[in-house]
C-alpha cells in the first residue's frame, strides 16, 4: 500500500486521471491522493482492490454492456427498416 510522500500517511486513495496521467500510466506510474493532507503524488505501487469494489465494478460493466447491446440492436433494426423502405418497389 502506498504512503503519502509529504506526510507519510497510509490513508491514500487513487486519484482521478487526466491526459498526463494516462501517459504516465504507460510507465507504471499511478496517481494517488492523500486523504490526510490532500497531497497528490504518483507511485509505481498499486493499491489493493477490495472484493466489494470488484463486485460493484462488475455490476456496472454488466449494466453498461446490456445498454450497449440494446442500443446496437435498436440501431440495427432502424437500419433494416430504412433498407426495407429504400428497396420497396415504386407503385
Image (tube, grey):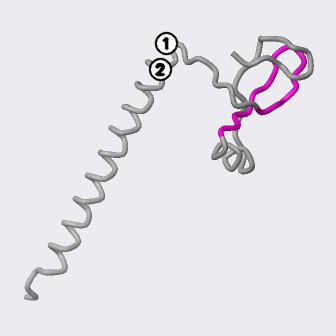
Label number found at residue 42 = none
- Residue in the image at 7% along x and 88% along y: 91
In the foreground, 8 or 83: 8
Q: Quadrant of residue 41?
A: top right
- Residue in the image at 72% along x and 44% along y: 21
Label number found at residue 52 = 1
The answer to whether 52 appears left or right of 81 in the picture is right
> Cα distance, mark 1 to mark 2?
5 Å
Helix, strand or loop status at disc 1: helix
Indicate yes or no whether the magenta region holds residue 40: yes
- Which corner quadrant holds the N terminus? top right
Depicted 54 relative to depicted 79: above or below:
above
Q: Position of residue 19 (x, y in %)?
A: 71, 50
Name, please, the residue furthest toward the bottom: 90
Q: Position of residue 10 (x, y in %)?
A: 78, 11
Helix, strand or loop status at disc 2: helix
Classify mark 1: residues with Cα within 10 Å, few (<14), some (14-19) or many (20+).
Answer: few
- Residue in the image at 75% along x and 30% along y: 43
Residue indicated by mark 2 = 54
Q: Are marks 1 and 2 in contact (CB under 8 Å)?
A: yes
Depicted 84 relative to depicted 23: above or below:
below
Indicate yes or no whether the magenta region holds residue 34: yes
Depicted 56 relative to depicted 84: above or below:
above
Q: Position of residue 60 (x, y in %)?
A: 45, 29
Q: Quadrant of residue 16?
A: top right
Residue range (magenta):
28-42
Q: Quadrant of residue 49?
A: top right
- Residue in the image at 81% along x and 16% along y: 35
Q: Position of residue 58 (x, y in %)?
A: 41, 26
The answer to whether 72 appears left or right of 27 in the picture is left
The answer to whether 75 appears left or right of 35 in the picture is left
Classify mark 2: residues with Cα within 10 Å, few (<14), some (14-19) or many (20+).
Answer: few
Amino acid at each position: 500500500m502506498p504512503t503519502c510522500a509529504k506526510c507519510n500517511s497510509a490513508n491514500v486513495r487513487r486519484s482521478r486521471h487526466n491526459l498526463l496521467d494516462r501517459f504516465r500510466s504507460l510507465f507504471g506510474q499511478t496517481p494517488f491522493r492523500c486523504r490526510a493532507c490532500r497531497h497528490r503524488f504518483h507511485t509505481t505501487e498499486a493499491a489493493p482492490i477490495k472484493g466489494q469494489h470488484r463486485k460493484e465494478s462488475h455490476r456496472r460493466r454488466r449494466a453498461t454492456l446490456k445498454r450497449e447491446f440494446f442500443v446496437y440492436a435498436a440501431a440495427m433494426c432502424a437500419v433494416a427498416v430504412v433498407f426495407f423502405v429504400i428497396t420497396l418497389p415504386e407503385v
